[in-house]
Amino acid sequence: MIYLDNNATTPVDPEVSDAILSSLKRDFGNPSSTHSIGQRARDVIEKSRMLISELIGCKSAEIYFTSGGTESNNLAIIGIAERPKRGHIITSVIEHPSVLNPCRYLESRGFQVTYLPVDSAGMVVIDEFKKSIKKDTILITIMHANNETGVLQSVGEIGAIAGERGIPFHIDAAQSTGKMPVNVSQVKADMMTIVSHKFYGPKGIGALYLRDGLELSPILFGAGHERGLRPGTENVHGIVGLGKACELAKMNIRNRVAHATKLCEMLFRGLTEKIDGIRLNGHETLRLPNTLNICIHGIDSTDLLESIKDKVAASSGSACHAGQRKPSPVLKAMGLSDVDAMSSLRLSVGKDNTEEEIKEAVEIIAAMVKILNLNSK
């Protein structure tokens, strides 16, 4: 199996799994206990908090642990909205459901939400964003990198405008953290979502960066864990894994970017040489180094993936709900027709992929496209 679905999830790095296993054997104490066994667990949590802060360039105390991206996004969005109880929120139509659905929930409670459109490259238009700001705008939440196309939004510019207006700015950085350099000062974030399993850490653990001085209301209620913002006994072993993943990312980020860029270029060049009618979905350069979303005209990508599922792992441009295939809302927002969206394929490489795998994947995909084209005639 050639694994080219790293935006869905990544394999756990061996050094991360070793750190988790060691923690499982050693750090069994409750971090809230005052005895030495509990305090040892507390110490490894604080070390991981520090490792995350070093990766993204913030204070250790600005990191709050959650169960993952969905909870971090919900905490940022609903946690802000719970304070004024009303107001206006700005987001985009291409956000992850863990952003869109909390916004829709808040709409049902009387908040106003602007869903910004994107251009054909999948980018929010800055002038449209500026026009959408209102006197009662309480939050701007825009993803850094799109999970389907890898397109990078102009978060630094958006964040600077938000800062001038005094509006909290939240970034969903689930797809970019650990794959490319991400610094909270450069992206002008007040809040930022971090997801462990997107960069070789374990599932079920994530974090929210919350700028010092910005206050949120909790969305879960219990004891006073995570300085009263996120109750529940900490997932010590998951936190250790996330910390180790951040440590490795900081050490290896330049090599990861260079490796992913080279493999993605090989993949795109190889496929375009062997298959007619391929078109890139998204911006040519402003996208994640590891992500390639392409439309193969005349092919149903779901059928293609089904045909190669034992050889190559990737994702399609459709979503399956209750057995029905529907075109990707992200690709539709970029102006693709239903047919072209359903003909689209997401290929996302990782640090462990090799050039030989990429060459083989090109041959497998090209051969199956040829077969599917012949069968359709």
Image: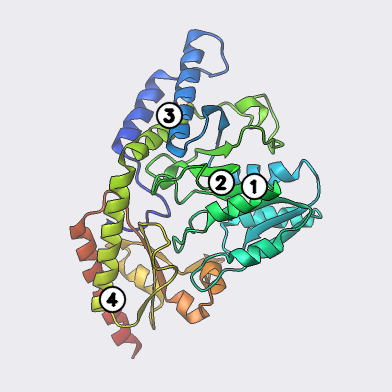
Q: Is residue 347 above or below residue 66?
A: below
> From the viewer's perspective, is the residue at label 3 or at label 2 nearer?
2
The numbered disc on residue 188 is: 2
Tell me which numbered mark, 4 or 1, is placed earlier along the sequence. 1
Residue placed furthest toward the bottom = 377
Earlier in the chain: of badge 2 and badge 4, it is 2
2 or 1: tag closer to the N-terminus: 1
Question: Residue 343: percent from the left, percent from the top?
Answer: 42, 76
Name the amino acid type tagged 1: Gly
Give the Cα distance between marks 2 and 1.
8 Å
Q: Amino acid at mark 3?
A: Val
The residue carrying mark 4 is 272
| Residue under label 3 | 240
Can residue 143 be seen from the camera position used here? no
Number of other residues with Cα within 10 Å of mark 2, as a class: few under 14, some 14 to 19, many 20 or more: many
Distance (Cα) linking label 2 and label 4: 37 Å
State which quadrant residue 376 falls in: bottom left
Distance (Cα) linking label 1 and label 3: 33 Å
Residue, far top: 35
Who comes first in sequence, dot 3 or dot 2? 2
Q: Which residue is mark 1?
A: 163
Q: Is residue 107 above or below residue 339?
A: above
Residues marked 2 and 1 touching at CB (< 8 Å): yes
Badge 2 element: loop
Quick one: SS at disc 1? helix
